[in-house]
Image: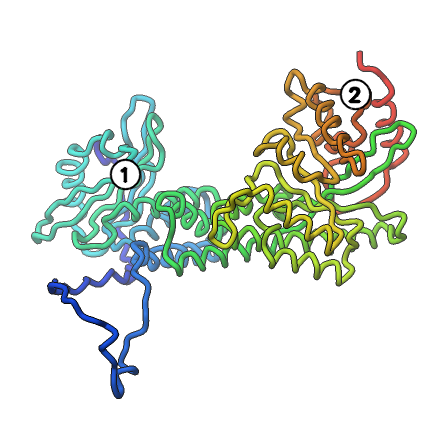
Amino acid sequence: MGDLNASFDIVDNQTNNITTESELEDIPNHHSQNINLGTIKPSGDLYHLQPPISQLRNFLEPYESLIKNLIQQFTNLVKERLTVDYQTINHYILNIIRQTSEADLVFILGSDRADNLYIKSHSNLGQDIDQNFYFNTLNTHILPTVSQVAIFNPAYHGIYRLHEDTNGERKAFVFIPLKGLPQAEVIVVCGIPQDSYLLGDIYGRILSSFYQAVQKFSHSPALVEAVILDDLKKDFGFIAAHLYERRFQLFCDRLQKMIVYFEPVLHLDPDELFISSWEALARDPDTLTAPVDLFQAAEMWGTRFIVELDQYFLRTATSSYQEARKQSKQNRSKDIVPLSVNVYPESLIRTAYFETVRQVLQEKTITSRNLILEISEKTELPQFNEGVQLKSPLTFFKKKLLEYVSQLQIRFAIDDFGVGYASVTRLAGLNPSHVKIDRNILYHQPSDIIIRFVHELVSANNLNPSNVIVEGVDETTPMSLYHLHKIGVKYIQGHIVAKPSPDIYRLSKEKYDDLRRLILEKPH
């Protein structure tokens, strides 16, 4: 794998004490007896001697201290070293890994165009280590015997090789892939004790997640920790109870920082051109982009996360809308247009979300007439209720929506129509007040046919036909405003009208004239 041709500074560093998993006691295997447990009755103080009921240990529990130590040291580093360059930060990160792993040395191997591996960065050496002997051991006995095929085996998160040092102590050299071939990158952890609990696949997953997340979120320990827990969930299906609660806390902390922007929906009529409603969009205050990581986390972790997210954004969207109206001096009832707030189908069947909607209305943050809940087509309807599989998810879901309509007078919209689950079936079954056609439809060849079909489908409900809104319309959209208006589109949303902002407003005269011209003039 190539020689270690890099110099290392030997610095005395105290290693963190890592709590290792205790060994299980051997339990003798007695033959079962036919015993009537009902005849055995505890007497006296035996009731008080019964041990508490405990859950079976989760295989990830021993690694909780490793994750905690990694994040704690990284947090300290962020506080102290905010202005250092990338190489220096990387050096400190490798030292953190070395200390928390109780290892001798950590380094990163990269691959050049000739497929030769070389050292990109490294930690300090641990205490009381013979530098010459150590590097000779690596060059002669370890690196030449480890193949790239073994390292990059997709079935594992790393491999290790045991070697005996001059004192007769056997230590492990761990190779964890960070990037696959041909641009290979490997983290090598040298000198982990042979009996360490770390010599497992979970260690490889945690370390690769930690290192790569630090490269992306170099100033946010919370996001780094969230990535580690998400990766464990993806790879192993579930995690220990304490780690789950920690992930929920991280989710809530980040959620509380999010803000809301508003995007207008335009009534597309040259003789009656106005903003007919607004959609509330979640935004990260640091980047002013959608907090995709929160949506992905909610969908990965399930109901508790989803409902928490939807409750927060409902409250934030409606209160922000109320404040934005005050700032724009649009407080008269005739000036207030509806606000759409996105919600996962899973939340709509939960009592907690229903009560949050009720509370928002009772507090008069918004009226039921001006609140529209948007149900995304990209998400499947709930298949279970309280652990029981539903025979007809659509029927059950519609029943839940009718409770919102009858008790709270709430209206609904179907969002992202045309790209999700059973679009036509859901549309026909729910009879929403608004239907939003996903922008991707505009890039299909028969897009006008699809749009006409949706209009015909919703108009079949003569008593209450849905308003059809075409989303994502901008200057690059294949269909012009002229053509959209010609085929019967009455509402559009997208950057051609305005980009999302924290403010609400009326169309300026300049914008009004520009949009009206685009509707009336046939493109060349």
Front residue of 26/97: it is 26
Relative to residue 409, is residue 124 drawn left or right? Answer: left
Question: Which residue occupies 65% across, 56% down?
Answer: 354
Dividing the picture into quadrants, the one containing residue 52 is bottom left
Residue 520 circle label: none
Q: Is residue 143 above or below residue 291?
A: above
Please state which amino acid type lies under the numbered disc 2: Ile
Relative to residue 92, is residue 107 drawn left or right? Answer: left
| Residue labelled with disc 2 | 487
Q: Position of residue 399 (x, y in %)?
A: 64, 48
Question: Which residue occupies 79% across, 41% down?
Answer: 277
Relative to residue 132, is residue 326 drawn left or right? Answer: right
Please state which amino acid type lies under the numbered disc 1: Tyr
Q: Which residue extends farthest top?
A: 524
Dividing the picture into quadrants, the one containing residue 428 is top right
Per the model, the C-alpha gap separating discs 1 and 2 is 55 Å
Q: Is residue 478 visible?
A: no
| Residue labelled with disc 1 | 156
Q: Nearer the viewer, mark 1 or mark 2?
A: 2
Q: Are marks 1 and 2 in contact (CB under 8 Å)?
A: no
Helix, strand or loop status at disc 1: loop
Q: Residues within 10 Å of mark 1 (few under 14, many from 20)?
A: some
- Badge 1 or badge 2: first in the primary sequence: 1
Helix, strand or loop status at disc 2: loop
Q: Is residue 329 above or below residue 482?
A: below
Question: Which residue occupies 28% across, 77% down?
Answer: 50
